[in-house]
Image: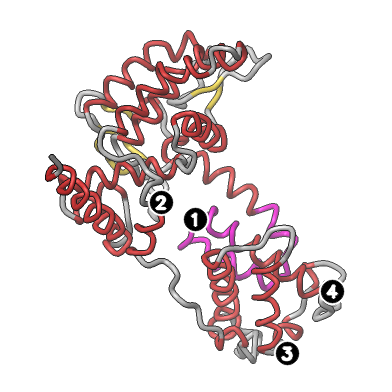
Amino acid sequence: MNVQKEQDRKKLDDKVLTMPWYVQQFIDYKLPDLSPSTLLEYIRDYETFFNWLRAEGLSAAPDNGKVTLEELEVLRMEDVVSYRLYLTTRRESANSKITVSRKLSSMRSLFHYLSQIAEDDNFYPLLKRNIMAKVEIKRIHKPKDTAAKLKGKILEEDELLEFIGYIMDGYAKDVANNKQALYAHELNKERDACIASLILNSGLRVSEVVNLNVDDLDMNNKMLYVYRKGNNDETFKTPVYFREQARDDLAQYLNLRQSRYKVPKREKALFAALPNGHQEGGRMTKRAIQAMIIKYAKRFGKPYLTVHKLRHSFATDYYLQNDIYKTKEQLGHASTETTEVYAHLTDKTMSEAIERRLEP
C-alpha cells in the first residue's frame, strides 16, 4: 500500500468508529472496491449529515454513532431540500455546486446499500424507505465548461519551461530583500524545480509524486513506476513516461538529495524535506508540495496556478502532439470523457495561435 493510502486507511479506521454500525458495515462492503481516501471522504460527508440531523432535531441521538435507521426512514423530501440549502448557504464554509453534488451522491450510495443490498436477520432490507432515491444528482462536470474555467489559469506553450526556470533563478531576484526566503530558496531550488518539471513533463498527480521512491525511477528509459488512482491492486505500479527535460532536472536533484537533505538509508522517498531542527530528512508531504507551487506561482504572475493545474498544463501541451487515447493513458484517466477537457482547451489554444500567426 502506498504512503498516502496507509495514512488515509489509518484515519478511516479511526473515523469509522464514530459512525453508526450500519455505516461501518457499508464501509466494509465498499473497502475492496474503493480506496481508503475515497471512503474517508464518505465518512466526512456522513459526519456532516448526522451533525446536521441532530442539530435540526431530526435525530435524538446524543452522538453520531447513535443515529438510528428508523430516523433515516422517516425523513421527508423537505428535509433533504433543507440539507441541500444548508450545504450551499452555511456561513462558516459554503460548498460549491460540485461539492454539494458529491456529498449528496455519497448519501445516495449509503441509502442505496441500506435499502437494496444489506439485509437483516429475516432477509428484509435494513432500510424500508429510501428518501435519497428521489434525489436527482445533476451532472456538474462538463468537459467544455471545465475547459473554459481552466483557460488562463494554466501554463501554455513557452510558459512551461519559463516556470521551471523561474523556480531555479527568477524567484531569488524577487525575494532578494528577504533573507529567510532567500535562504530557503537556495536550499530547495533544485528540488522544487525538479518537482515542477516532473509534473510538467509527465502529468503526474501530486499524490503520485509524494509516493515516489528512488527505486521507482528508470532514468535510462525515461520512465517511473507509480501507484495510480483507481487501481485496486496495491502491489502493482503503472509505468509512466517522462520527457527529456525532466530527466535532466531529476539528475541534478539526485546528485544533492543525500547531502542536502540528510536522508537516512532507510528512507526511500524520492522527494525529501529537512525540517528545521531535524537531523534527518524525510518524505515531503502533499501539503508541502501544494504550498510550494502556490508560493512560486504567485510571484510568477499566475496566482490561480496550483499543483493540479500543472498537471492540466502538461495534459494540454501533450494533447497537442498526441491523440485523446494516448493522453488518457498517460494521465491515468478511467475514461476518455475526462480527457475531453483538453480537446476543448487545445481547440482554443490552436485558434489563438492561428490568429497570432496572421498578425503582421
Residue drawn at point x = 41 percent, y = 56 percent: 149
Task: Tell whether position 30 is magenta.
Answer: yes
Asked if residue 1 is positioned above or below residue 72 in the image, the reply reads above
- Amino acid type at mark 3: Val
Q: Bounds of the magenta span?
A: 13-42
- Tell me whether circle 4 and circle 3 mark residues in contact (CB < 8 Å): no
Mark 3, residue position: 74
Q: Earlier in the sequence, mark 1 or mark 4?
A: 1
Mark 2, residue position: 229
Mark 1, residue position: 35
Real-space Cα separation, disc 4 to disc 3, in angstroms: 15 Å
Residue 305, image quadrant:
top left
Q: Earlier in the sequence, mark 3 or mark 2?
A: 3
Q: Secondary structure at mark 3?
A: loop
How far from the left and from the top, in percent, is residue 330?
26, 46
Real-space Cα separation, disc 3 to disc 2, in angstroms: 37 Å
Residue 251, image quadrant:
top left
Mark 4, residue position: 61
Relative to 2, is 325 on the left or the right? left
Instruction: Tell us which disc is closer to us: 3 or 1.
Output: 3
